[in-house]
Image: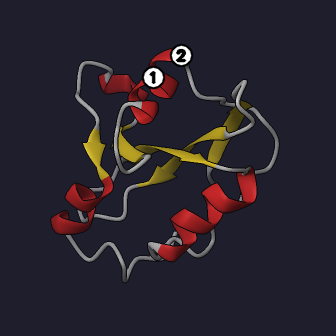
Amino acid sequence: MSAGGFCKLPNGTVVVAMTLPSPTAGGGDVRMIVHAVNRARALTRLRNLGLRAVYLRGNAEPPTPDEVTAVLHHPDGLIWRTAPDRAAELWHPIRALKRQGSFLASSV
């Protein structure tokens, strides 16, 4: 089950953060941050990448200010890194996760 949350920005857009099981063979969790027009669009962006069973229920783990800043400064508006226990790790674009394994064939 994924945990996540969202925050609405002053311009009306939202940033959605979700902690999901890693789609790569290494296991663990990844934290995905998505910037979109609304929550539905953010989840659609993740589903279009192959994460079909992604749902946002509640707002238990909203994005931190650092996560919001990181995703707003990234041209794709979709970034990830391993779960928050390794906060010193830099954010990666989504294409880096897709290169690591059979990301599109995974089922979360």
Look at the numbered discs 1 and 2 and tell me whether their residues touch, using CB distance below 8 Å.
yes
Q: Position of residue 52 (x, y in %)?
A: 58, 76
Q: Position of residue 71 (x, y in %)?
A: 43, 35
Q: Is residue 97 left or right of residue 76?
A: left
Q: Residue at x 68, y 40 (%)?
A: 13
Q: Secondary structure at mark 2?
A: helix
Q: Determine which of the numbered discs, if any, sits on residue 13 in the image.
A: none
Residue under pointer 1? 69
Q: Is residue 50 left or right of residue 25?
A: right
Q: Residue at x 36, y 44 (%)?
A: 80
Q: Determine which of the numbered discs, if any, sits on residue 65 in the image.
A: 2
Query: Could you tell me how far apart the alpha carbons at marks 1 and 2 are, in whole angstroms?
Result: 6 Å
Amino acid type at mark 1? Thr
- Within-10-Å neighbours for mark 1: few <14, some 14–19, many 20+: few
Nearer to the camera, 96 or 82? 96
Quadrant (top left/top right/bottom left/bottom right) for the N terminus: bottom right
Q: Position of residue 70 (x, y in %)?
A: 39, 28
- The scheme the figure's colours follow is secondary structure
Q: Residue at x 20, y 56 (%)?
A: 96
